[in-house]
Image (spheres, helix red, strand yellow):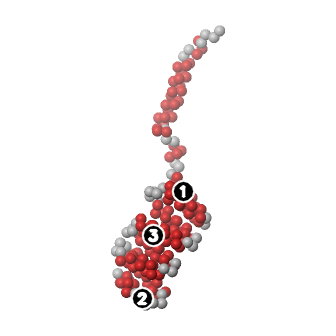
Amino acid sequence: MFSGFYFKDRFKRFTVAVFLSLLIPASVFPQGGNPAKDSVPPDSDLLLRIAEESFKDRKFYQSIESLRSFLVLYPGNSKRTKVLLLLRDCFLKLDRPEKALEVSLNLYKMEPTGEFGLESYLEAGRLLAKMGEIDQAKEVFSSICRQSYSRVMAEKAALEFSGLDVLSDVEPSSEADSCREK
């Protein structure tokens, strides 16, 4: 018969070995952290990289899809401005000025006094002129000229304003002269 003499101290050693094998990995990787997981960029960065690669490969619809997903899934992300700029560029490449105008105005709303905001507002004026809305484009350019946030943007707006006056058959307006004088 079996007396159990062979297993006398083996059970204690087995339980200690199992306990230590569970305890050591928990101390090496605290709170369930995985070292491989730390090197993987977040999903938002992956989605943005997919959109950028699609844009470079001239797959603009796929890029727009990824960018819209980014905007829906990560509304407070710090890269939102970069995403909107890329989205505007996609719409411009697809010759959709009305959508690009919408994105440009959205960028301006986000940062009305910053460089990106004023640049996108200037782009909105250019798009309005391209779409044939000359009066609205002139309003945008004169608005940029009146703002004293950025001298460079005011000069660019004055150039666009004078370009519209040259292309139109009417005489230059007093707003264009005041914009150029500043």
Can the viewer see residue 159?
A: no
Residue sitting farthest toward the right: 1
**Is label 1 or label 3 in front?**
3
Q: Amino acid at mark 1?
A: Leu
Which residue is at a point 56% across and 63% down the rendered structure image?
Answer: 64
Which residue is at a point 49% across and 64% down the rendered structure image?
Answer: 84
**Is label 1 or label 2 in front?**
2
Name the secondary structure under disc 3.
Answer: helix
Q: Is residue 127 left or right of residue 118?
A: right
Q: Which residue is mark 3?
A: 105
Q: Residue 112 at x, y = what percent?
A: 39, 68
Q: Earlier in the sequence, mark 1 or mark 3?
A: 1
Q: Which residue is mark 1?
A: 47
Q: Amino acid at mark 2?
A: Pro
Q: CA distance from mark 2 to mark 3?
A: 27 Å
Name the secondary structure under disc 1.
Answer: helix
Q: Count the numbered circles shown.
A: 3
Q: Amino acid at mark 3?
A: Leu
* Vertical comparison of 182 with 117: above or below: below
* Vertical comparison of 42 with 112: above or below: above
